Amino acid sequence: MTRIQASADVFVAVAEPQRRRILDLLSAGELPVNDIVKYLHISQPLASKHLRILRTVDLVTVRNLAQQRFYRLNAARLKPIHQWLGSFEQFWEESFDRLDVYLQDLQRRESNDRVP
């Protein structure tokens, strides 16, 4: 995947832990870049780099007010990730059902072992 393709891919953008932390912060509401820097304990250039990538894939929007830049989450762009993860729902449901059956079987065996 070329750098241009990677920068336009929401999946690639959220693969980086610091960018996910930024998205988590912005899920609570709009923040200026200086607050993002403060909350994440990262440098301003690093925060700007991550925010630029998030803007490229339209996961965040920016609003300029005087000398400050305010960033806001564009949660609608997370929909492809949500849909992809949803495709695994049946797998997890079946896995949990099997685990539940297994645990119930273990409990029955333990009950039977305790009966004199």
Image (tube, rainbow, N blue to C red):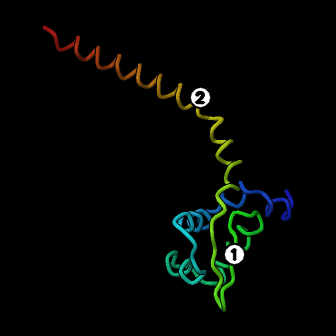
Q: Which mark is residue 90?
A: 2
Amino acid at dot 2: Gln
Residue 83 in the image, given as x and y percentages of width and height: 67, 42
Residue at image point 56% right, 80% down: 37
Mark in the foreground, 1 or 2 = 1
Q: What is the number of the mark on residue 79?
A: none
Residue under the point 59% across and 29% down: 90
Q: Are marks 1 and 2 in contact (CB under 8 Å)?
A: no
Label 1: element kind? strand
Report which residue position mark 1 lands on. 62
Tell me where residue 100 appears, x and y as whole percent: 41, 24
Quick one: which residue is furthest to the bottom in this view?
Answer: 67
| Dot 1 amino acid type | Val
Crowding at dot 2, Cα within 10 Å, few <14 / some 14-19 / many 20+, comes out as few
Choose between 78 and 41: the one closer to the eye.
78
Above or below, comparing residue 105 to residue 62 in the picture: above
Residue at the spot 47% in from the left edge and 22% down from the top edge: 98
Looking at the rendered structure, the secondary structure element under dot 2 is: helix
Q: Position of residue 78 (x, y in %)?
A: 67, 53
* Residue 66, picture quadrant: bottom right
In the image: residue 92, left or right of residue 78: left
Residue sitting at 67 percent across and 62 percent down?
74
Q: Residues within 10 Å of mark 1 (few under 14, many from 20)?
A: some
